[in-house]
Image (cartoon, grey):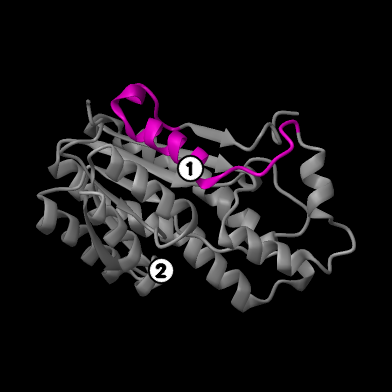
Amino acid sequence: MTLEFAGKTVLISGSARGQGAAHAMRFAEEGANVVVSDVRDELGEGVAERVRQKDGRAVYQHLDVRVTAQWDQAVARAENEFGGLDILINNAGIVSCDAVDACSDDTWGIVLDTNAAGVFKGMRAAVPALKRAGGGAIVNTASMMGVVGSWGYAAYVSSKFAVVGLTKSAALTYAADNIRVNAIAPGCVDTPMLDEEKAIMASNPYWDFDEWVATQPISKIAQPEEVSELVLFLASDRTRYCTGGVYPIDGGSTAG
């Protein structure tokens, strides 16, 4: 059996649960060395241990994506443990559901710092390591709300549009260094963050989640493992001519 990422090392932010944990497991299944990183240390250690129990190679590194020094430490950990860094998956993110006139300065700040500045700082820390490795791939997690927007969600939508812009700028900048940069734009994915979002929006008189899902072209919620398949595809040599793209995985929600 050919392991697609054998000998490669991947650093995944926000990988203690949800989509990030699914990505970590799939990369490990394909032979990658995995640096699991998050602020949820117990859960993150658990993901790394699950990888090791399946005979994979993984370490856990505490990472608050808002903190530059912690990004530097995570990249250094990848290089020190596994000899280099080949792939960065900027997965960490948070959601807020406030409209412009209901969004506080604090909410705006933490959402943009996490979702947008966190991606920027991750790429800034990883690019020198990817250059040292002779090139590599970056996959950023945007959102369908970074493609078409949404009612409310002022800070979240703004942060995800920023991710799209960062992706395109970095793709153009680093193509000559053999570094490809792409983004995924998921719709609703069955994760703890979606559960948190639904709880927040339950009292919104203008939005019924189940009704919205039923109106989508593929009227179901995605599973994290389905998103992982796209992430691995974009990180692989199968897409070596793809950079600067934003790839929807939203059941057709943004197609119309």
In what quadrant of the picture does the C terminus appear?
top right
Instruction: List the residue tagged with mark 2.
Output: 66
Front residue of 172 and 41: 41
- 42 above or below 163? below
In what quadrant of the picture does the N terminus appear?
top left
The part of the image, by quadrant, that contains residue 46 is bottom left
Instruction: List the residue tagged with mark 1.
Output: 225
* Apparent side of residue 18 relative to residue 152 in the rendered image (left or right): left
- What is the x, y in percent for residue 129? 18, 49
- 199 above or below 206? below
Label 1: state its secondary structure.
helix
Q: Could you classify mark 2 by the number of other residues whose Cα lies within 10 Å: few (under 14), some (14-19), or many (20 or more)?
A: many
Disc 1 to disc 2, how far (Cα)? 26 Å
Residue found at x 70% / y 47%: 149
Residue 225 within the segment the image draws in magenta: yes
Front residue of 204 and 3: 3
- What is the x, y in percent for residue 63? 33, 68
Nearest to N terminus: mark 1 or mark 2: 2
**Magenta region, residue range:** 217-244
The part of the image, by quadrant, that contains residue 176 is top left
Query: What residue type is disc 2 on?
Result: Arg
Query: What residue type is disc 1 on?
Result: Glu
- 156 above or below 216? below
